Image (cartoon, rainbow, N blue to C red):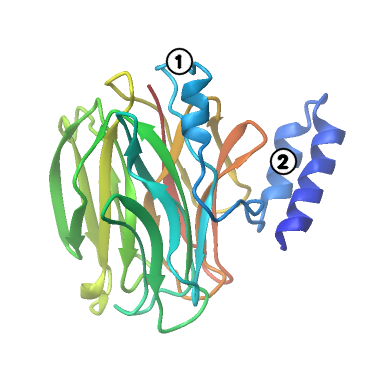
Amino acid sequence: MQAWATSTLLTRVARFASSTRLFPLLTAAALAGCSEPTAPRTASTDEQAALSAGASAQLIPYSNVYYWSQGDPPTYMGANGTFGIKRVCYLTRVSGRFTSYNESVRIYLVGKDWYLSGSSGTAGIGAAARCMAVLDYSQEYMRLSEQTTMLNQGNTWMCFLTGLGGQLSDGDMVGLTAPTPGFGPKWHVWAVGATGSSNDLWVGARCARPLDGGAKIIVTNGWYGGAPVPLTSSDGRVCVLRVVHGPFDSSAAYAHVLKVFNDWWLSAGNTGEGASAYAGCFSG
């Protein structure tokens, strides 16, 4: 669905449903198969504007959406900090046909500037990202298929995907596991290949601390099919992709955390057997 059509549809849904109990159902229907309305592809100053307006340190200021598609040059997403406030970027959408080591999307630093880019030998590879103002952020952790690594960061940090590549067939997955009593006090990053040719699978991740010094995990949710899943209010809260699960075997495959009006949603899909995803949401 084209971005202008999505925007028009969602506007009409809002006008019709904003005062009724039908809003969640109608919004979910409008989201199915649609992309987030097009946002500027240049650096956003939303985070700095929120801070200068006196936003509470309990909130997490975040940017507009940045996009990259196959064939595009790297998308510039702004600097990694200014005036003593650091800035880190994270994936909100991954799409396309991931069938070999040639396919990838990644957020990376060049000097002090963030970029979103990728590579492809097939079709439809793309990604979207946002950036947020934080107290601090970690190095990037890179892991290959069949590797699980405990990170240095515990439950006062929020961790998120910054890149992935390789073959994402049915059963292949990459992601992050949050600290839990059963899994330990630290975040873990992992890549699991279910097929013999999945050795090319890799994942990248970072962690960050909100401006007040400690993150709170407020929502974790998964999508396996059907209507998009509502996550939480977008008021000063950040939602990120936490797990991406194959098959990503067509140009229509995608996993997406998106903002509609004042709420975060999670969606994923494919033309055949569906892809799936998990999201995590944080507050300061």
Q: Position of residue 237 (x, y in %)?
A: 47, 28
- Which-is-in-front pick, marks 1 and 2? 1
**Label number found at residue 56:** 1
Amino acid at the residue labelled 2: Thr
Residue 121 visible (yes or no): yes
Q: Is residue 43 above or below residue 284?
A: below
Q: Amino acid at mark 1?
A: Ser
Q: Is residue 34 left or right of residue 107?
A: right
> Foreground: 249 or 132?
132
**Marker disc for residue 27:** 2
Residue in the picture at 53% in, 53% down: 42
Q: Position of residue 109 (x, y in %)?
A: 29, 55
Residue 183 placement (x, y as % from top left): 18, 36
Element at label 2: helix
The quadrant in which residue 104 appears is bottom left
Position of 226 relative to 172 (above/below)? above
Seen at 33% across and 43% down, the residue is 80
Q: Can you say whether 26 is above or below 34 in the image?
A: above
Q: Quadrant of the C terminus?
A: top left
At horizontal 67% and vertical 51% (from top left) the residue drawn is: 37
Quarter of the image where the N terminus is located? bottom right
Please tell me which residue is depicted at 15% across the width and 59% down the height of the picture.
147
Tag 1, which secondary structure? loop
Query: As displayed, is residue 69 above or below residue 141?
Result: below
Q: Is residue 172 visible?
A: no
Residue 199 x %, y %: 20, 74
Within 10 angstroms of label 2, few (less than 14), some, or many (20 or more) residues?
many
